[in-house]
Amino acid sequence: MPFPFTLSTTSTASFANHYTSAAYPSLPLACSTHRGILRDALKAYKRVPASAQGAHIKHITAVTSEYLSYLLHLIDAVRTGDATPIPGAPVLSTSWRPTLAASSTFGGLRQQARKAGEGLQYELFWVLLTLACSHTIQARALLMEFLTVPPSSSGNPVDSQSSSSSSSSALLPQATKHLLTSASIFSYMLTLTPPHSSSPTTTTSLPIDISPPLLSALSLTSLSSATLLAVLKSDPYPTYLALSTSATSKEYLYSAPAPPTGVKALLFSRLCIAASEHAAKAQGAISGIVREGKVCDEYIRYLDELRRVGRARGCRFLGLDAEAQSRLGEGLGWMKLASEILTGEEEEQEEESNKKKKKKKSSSLASRFKSSPSSASPNHQSSLDANSAAAATSSSSSILPAIPTAGGLPHSMDPCTLHSELQTILALAARWAKTNDKLIFDRIPPTNSLMGRIPSGREVHSVPEFVPDRLGVVEVGELRRGGGEGGSAGGRSGGGGGGEGYVERWGEGTETARDSSDDEDGGASARSRGGMPGAYY
């Protein structure tokens, strides 16, 4: 599931007070108008309940894209000399509220101070960030609709399945398109020149939301989520889990697609592993700023769970293929390995094995330099015998998969979270273990031997090149004539005003005034979960 971003809000600004243009007389006023429309839309969206935000995100995307075209035209006009700063006017300064930075507490409310910056480039970065986040939220809304809307109730189950497939067949491609667009916008921002700071230490004063490490991680995160969507349509278990855990579902005749086997299962496994690798790369990209405590805990936890779910889901597809080929013991081994990945036991076992290898290597090197090998060899042999006996005992006692219980997991959950993936693996393992214990008695291989058989990842998507929308011939002609939307809606350009508030000056750390009408309402901008507990990916 894509990450549930919280959209940033911004302060008021008027380009007409800072720029003038003889070639496009109404361009500064038109930019101010569309910026005021975007600001009002962001403030209204923040106050919409989390369950209804998916229906309003299309308007945010459209308004942001429209404002971006006017802003880019102003930047190009300033670069070519068609627009110039007004002599004696102060430098344009805008402020935006970070949403991915580590949380700050002001007056007991969980909120962030706005970061103010100077210049058009600073404004461009935040507008692109808002557009990319809106595409991700729109993909999340489409995916939630695909997962939570059951097949239509009809008397004939065949008609129910056909109507369901026809209504939801376009949702996944649309969600994938929005995620790839989001990834391309984040990658496009990495190619731009970062905004200049008035402070000599630019790297420390740049807001964390538009810093290059976080932008690189966000691009990889969107690509990882899009890769996982490639296997969701053919995976029968998320939809079945959503219908079985819903208290209001009446789809008793739901016919799930057959689980993938053979080459298809191996392909899906490699796609899930590729998604896990993208999440791991995103973790590495922000490792430096995470150690400094600059990134919010929600996004750090999301990346860790996304990496675990992708890897565990790849093991689940391998287990389904092994069970279909009558290798039930191997299938149980893959399920046990998947549960260890989800619960973190795999990493603990890897750390313990690495410690044992280092200890064994150091002891063997020390024994070579001992002067009396006759006195040292019995002790060394006895320690080896003890280690081998302990290893044999542990391997014989762990033949059956020690899969944790599913007690305490919420029932109304997003079927793509870590908990739901664990619940799916537990259900499959319990059913297979019952058959294996009564009929087949197949040997379950240890997870260490299966860990080396995990295939490499395979890419299914490539991040396209982002080409921002530009103004058409009609809009440019209206700007040249001095008419258009800017002249008719000039009252919107300045936005609201009044009140003093706290704003952290980007690059300087000073305080400036802001509009008190854009305050956080009691921490209402805290990151939502899409209306479902634990709804991350």
Image: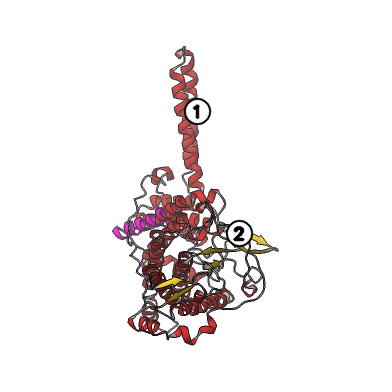
Within the image, what quadrant is residue 506 found in?
Answer: bottom right
Q: Position of residue 211 (x, y in %)?
A: 48, 57
What amino acid is found at the position of numbered circle 1 in the picture? Answer: Ala
When the figure is inspected, residue 436 is found, relative to residue 148, above or below; the finding is: above
Q: Residue at x 45, y 85 (%)?
A: 485
- Front-lying residue, 88 or 449: 88
Q: Residue at x 43, y 65 (%)?
A: 237
Q: Which residues are magenta?
A: 256-277
When the figure is inspected, residue 273 is found, relative to residue 230, above or below; the finding is: above
Q: Is residue 375 left or right of residue 504?
A: left
- Front-lying residue, 338 or 73: 73
Residue occupied by mark 1: 386
User: Is 449 part of what is drawn in magenta?
Assistant: no
The CA distance from mark 1 to mark 2 is 51 Å
Q: Residue furthest right?
A: 107
Q: Position of residue 46 (x, y in %)?
A: 57, 74
Within the image, what quadrant is residue 42 found in?
Answer: bottom right
